[in-house]
Image (spheres, rainbow, N blue to C red):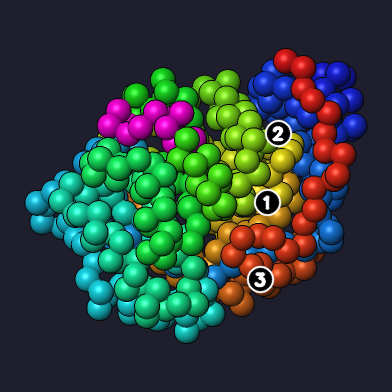
Amino acid sequence: MLSRRLLSKLERFERLSFDDGVELLCSDDISILGYFANEFLGKIHLNKLIRTYNIERNINYTNVCVSNCSFCAFCRSLGSVDGYVLGDDILFAKIAETVALGGKQILLQGGLHPSLSFEWYEGLLRRIKDNFPEVNVHGFSPTEIIFFSDRFGLSIREVLLRLRAAGLGSLPGGGAEILVDRVRRELSPNKASAERWLEVCREWHYLGGRGSATMMFGHIETVSERVEHLLRLRELQDETGGFTSFISWTFQPSNTRIAHIKKASVWEYLRLLAVSRLFLDNFKTIQSSWVTQGLEIGVLGLSFGANDLGSVMIEENVVAAAGTIHRSNESEFKQKIKNAGYIPSRRNLIYSSCFKIPEAGRASATT
């Protein structure tokens, strides 16, 4: 049972403290969490019955990576027989198919390839924009940006400015995992610190850019570390307002070096989803991850504080490499959303339609 003190804060829509977040994530009363999450969603949504989605494609331009993360089943080392770098013919065919299906955005990410030049990345963006000027490139995670900075001796700002000039439109939140260095050192010791990940987002936001924030949970992190992750995102959003959405998903253990870890349950996912809506009070959009949970659970998440079902993902490789494969289409998306009692609506690329944040905001937390 939640404490009377915390229930009172939820009823008044007060900003939650770190300790509040821990208490919520330790609660077994999933129905109460879902109720309050949807109540708060109704405070920032112009029409509380609308649930949005998009059409896009996740294109991994290479699977070659030097990071060697223990949780990844997708990446390959340089020289691996099944390592690849996509050529323009394959890349453009993928984008053309996306456009033909109504997509206006691609998610472009890859491994940390040790041999490609920075000019290669700039050229890649320019060729995409030359051939598909109407397509937004949502590309290169903060982890990739840091890799480019370190490898090519450029500042984070210079990397971002040059990529934007070449055609980068928005920044995905990949590589966040858990924004706690203890976890990062154990899971992915070759990746940058939590602070550097946040610094890339901060710099991009101050340059006028927008992008998503993410969390991959259900591996070696503690409940307190999950809340620390949410708190650091909320603090940066208070500072910049540059995050368009928050997307969380559960670790998929199959085919990884830590496959012994038990996969997080559906209820653990829904609990985190609801708590993220309540804790991240300055995020307009919380997305439900049907790609890892399956479409039925993804749609159920729309009743646990999520207002967006993500993308009709024409292609997805990273989660699929861990043995989790779910596919859908726009017609099924719309029907499933309707069946759940909501109104489906295809959103724009920066989630700016249909939402508002109360002018008064929430009261400051006392921790």
Under mark 2, the amino acid is Phe
Residue placed under numbered mark 3 in the picture: 346
First reached walking from the N terminus: tag 1 or tag 2 = 2
- Provide the secondary structure element on which disc 2 rests: helix
Above or below 210: residue 23: above
Q: Is residue 324 above or below residue 257?
A: below
Q: Quadrant of the C terminus?
A: top right
- Above or below, comparing residue 299 to residue 99 in the picture: above
Q: Do the residues under discs 3 and 1 have CB atoms within 8 angstroms?
A: no
Residue 346 x %, y %: 66, 71
Q: Residues within 10 Å of mark 3 (few under 14, many from 20)?
A: some
Q: Examine the structure image and report whether residue 191 is included in the region drawn in magenta.
A: yes
The stretch in magenta equals: 188-198
Q: Position of residue 97 (x, y in %)?
A: 41, 80
Query: Could you tell me how far apart the alpha carbons at marks 2 and 3 are, in whole angstroms?
Result: 26 Å
| Location of residue 130 by image quarter | bottom left
Labels 2 and 3 touching (C-beta < 8 A): no
Residue shown at 49%/68% (left/top)?
Answer: 136
Left or right: residue 52 compared with residue 150: right
| Residue at numbered disc 1 | 285
Q: In the rendering, at what x and y percent does residue 33 appear?
A: 76, 36
In the image, residue 173 lies in the stretch drawn in magenta:
no
- Coordinates of residue 132 in the picture (x, y in percent): 42, 78
Reading the image, the residue beneath label 2 is: 279
